[in-house]
Amino acid sequence: MSSTYTNTITQRRKTTKTKQQQQQWAASDSSGEPNERLHFRSRSTNSKVTTTASAVRNSPSPLCCNGALTMFNCCVDVNCHLNAPLRGSVSRQTTPSVTPTATPTPTATPKQVSPSPTSDRSRSRSASPSRSRSLSACHKQHKSSAVAASVTAKERDPDAMPPFTVSLNIDLFSWTLFFLAFGTRFYKLATPPHIVFDELHYGKYISMYLRNIFFFDQHPPLGKQLIAGLVSLVGFEGDHNFTRIGEPYSPEMPIFWFRFVPAMCGSLLAPAAYKLLLEAKLSRWSSALGGLLVVLDNSLLTQSRFVLMESMLLLASTVGIAFLLRFQRSRLGSVQWIISGAAAAVFLGAAGTIKYIGYLALGLAIYMLCRTLWQLLYDASLTNRQLWVHAISRLLLFIGLPLAVYIGVFYVHFRTLHRAGPHDSIMTSAFQASLEGGLASITKGQPLDVVHGSQITLRHTHGRTCWLHSHAAVYPVRYPDKRGSSHQQQVTCYSFKDVNNWWLVKRPTKENLVVGDNPDVIRHGDIIQLVHGITSRALNSHDVAAAMTPQCQEVSCYIDYEIKMAGELLWRVDIMNRDSEGDSWHAIKSEIRLIHVSTGAALKFSGHQLPDWGFNQHEVVADRDQKLNEHTIWNVEEHRYTQTEDHQERERQLLTAEMIPTQRTRLSFWAKLLELQSKMLFQTRGIPSHMYSSMPHEWPLMDKGIAYWLDSESSAQIYLLGNILIWYTATAGILVYAALLAFYAVRRQRLCFDISEEEWQRFLIAGDTFFVGYLVHYLPYFFVDRTLFLHNYLPAFVFKLLLLCFVVEHLDYLLRRFCTGRGVHLVRLYRLILIFWLICVVSIFFKFIPFSYGARKMSVGEVRRLRWKDTWDFVLHKNHPLH
């Protein structure tokens, strides 16, 4: 009797102890800090295995993988790399077995519950498939019962959701940020009524859009198209001349509507940043802080108030990344997945079609997509086919749609700009001939085939616009380096239309240049002579070093000095694009090389400029290098047949000839697109050095700004400067995030987990997105060889600002996690410091706001007091620099 009583007491104690431990574990699981477990990819594709693994992960278990509570088995996760018997033991089979090492055991009854965590893990691993099916069926039964109960409740209460009712949710944070940004951006938008900074260039382009005149710009045209479309609706016809910065606009100029699109995009940027932070799983207050900092930054305010492209670029990039984050969380093939992915691709493509720097945001998107695909490779529930679907669908969305946007924008560009203009000369002859009012059409007034007796001008096809040219002047007898020359007639490349650009094509065996009824067509491989139209001397080359490029041969027009130097006047015609144009030499479209027969050298534009004795024209040489070089390619631009043998009459005809006929020819859209792209990407001229230019290392601390406009009557001015407190704090945030990332990475490598798994994933996804976004938009400028300005930093600055919001929230999380007891005062102190910091940000914003609006006249003393850094080059009245 006593023995039975003793056993009963012992069993009750064990049961009580077991229940206490289970309650502790349950409390640990429900405390908001999920258990720290390492999850590794299972090799099983069986859905039943997945259900069992899910049940195991959701089972109560103590902290593991950090050496704190367990010594032998790390955790209950069948995929844990420390659980050696289970790693790699799951085979890819469709059998219902879970693992070879797990032995199915009967389900334990409540009386068999053991207080040992090890036994709990054993039961979790040995759960049978039949139990999983029964649990799943029970879950479905309860779910269907809940749905039925919900439907019954709705039927009983018809007022709860009446038919044909739309539920509207308004995010007050988002709308408040929009109205704050709208008020600051649109306040006195038409002030000043003068041309401000790059409004000089963008205004010209917009005016040319409205007059259908072709122009050349190194950036894509979407932003200019949007503004041109709006101002055309309000009646602007593009009749204003943009001549210089500071020039007043005419009274008829719709200044407000000219600046409307950039200002509206700047207003939408604040709620867009807020939504992006929400998509990155930041709290609503931290997200609102990000939108508020966008409103309170003076540089973003200034850049949004004028006809500039940055506000449109920043909005498209921000919205595109926000949609991408939503796309990453959506189920493959769902409506939200399709809409979010398409929107992200379109907005990112639009960013790159506003300015090429926008494609850096698309590069960030591709990095994020690759990161997600790499994580999907770990998911054992996905088959190889599903992984291919994920990869190919992303490729089609984020390569195909941006490319379609880009091509569509340029299609509108070419359809709109069909008239010739002042920028035509940078394009090839064929492109110019396709414009209305441009070069001569090859179908009317200008023959197609180049023949013996043709009068032609030879244009350098690629690169600098210039024409093969000669004049009566000769090379000097000796150059400054004591080298001698042939003292023959100079041959150069001249950048302007001139009568000395005309040459006559001649067969070596024929003397009569008049073109008869049966023209002698010049074909690929034919040997010709080129005779200068005005001086009647033939194109010549010989083994004499060129003036500026001594490794190449001199090119001249031959003069017989009777000193036993025979002329070498024969050239072979090589047609480079004969696959499309045929073997006959055609005007305008045939791209040719002229090969010197005696030496095998090709006629080449060297790129060097001759000194004063060469009238500062460009050098032409003969290069023996057999490699194909674009500077050796020429084409006939203007062309007609010789009608008289009399030299004086022929010269008179050349002098009185019309240099630019007015008919147009046809060129395909793709040919135009490829040519313009090559010019925009590779042939753009660098901006000369500017007094307000800056280097990338000066941007994070805002060492230099840009003077946009100065009032002619006072020291009122518009000067691009950011909110210095935001810029410096955001730069510190970059350093803090990098330090924390390195610290966490090292600690986790040692299996020490300082933050929860949820916070770590957020640290990687949100923080990594903004951190990499900053680096992607900032580091490339260190390798750019052109003049740069502070506004080039703004895309990187926006990502730095977003990262600052994440760092602020993460530091608050760390203080709440580790500062307990009396340490809670540190949390309160931290938040008070944030409030004080935000008040200072607002104060600095209003202190420097006169530089953003330029509406208030400022005295010299006021300007001096705002010069907080010696490198800020403010200007005073009459453009005296402030020292």
Image (cartoon, rainbow, N blue to C red):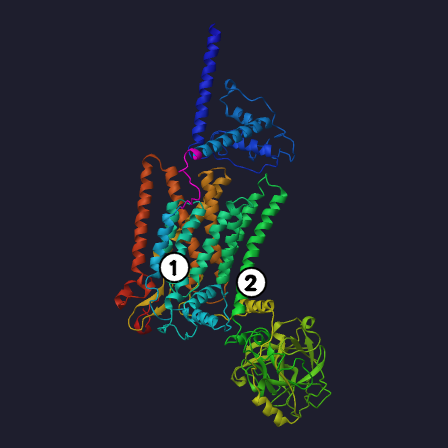
For mark 2, what is the residue? Answer: 407
| Between 726 and 385, the one nearer to me in the picture | 385
The image position of residue 844, as x and y in percent, is 31, 57
Left or right, residue 587 beside residue 114: right
The image quadrant of residue 81 is top right
Q: Is 617 placed above or below 311 here?
A: below
The image quadrant of residue 129 is top right
Range covered by the magenta-colored residues? 154-168
The image position of residue 179, as x and y in percent, is 35, 54
Looking at the rendered image, the disc whose residue lies closer to the viewer, 2 or 1, is: 2
Query: From where the camera sits, is residue 77 visible?
Result: no
Q: Residue at x 50, y 50 (%)?
A: 324
- For badge 2, the amino acid type reads Ile
Q: Main secondary structure of the magenta part?
A: loop
Q: Residue at x 31, y 61 (%)?
A: 849
**Labels 2 and 1: the sequence-earlier one:** 1
| Between 161 and 748, the one nearer to me in the picture | 161
Q: CA distance from mark 2 to mark 1?
A: 30 Å
Number of dots carrying numbers: 2
For mark 1, what is the residue? Answer: 300
- Of the 4 image quadrants, the one containing the C terminus is bottom left
Q: Secondary structure at mark 2?
A: helix
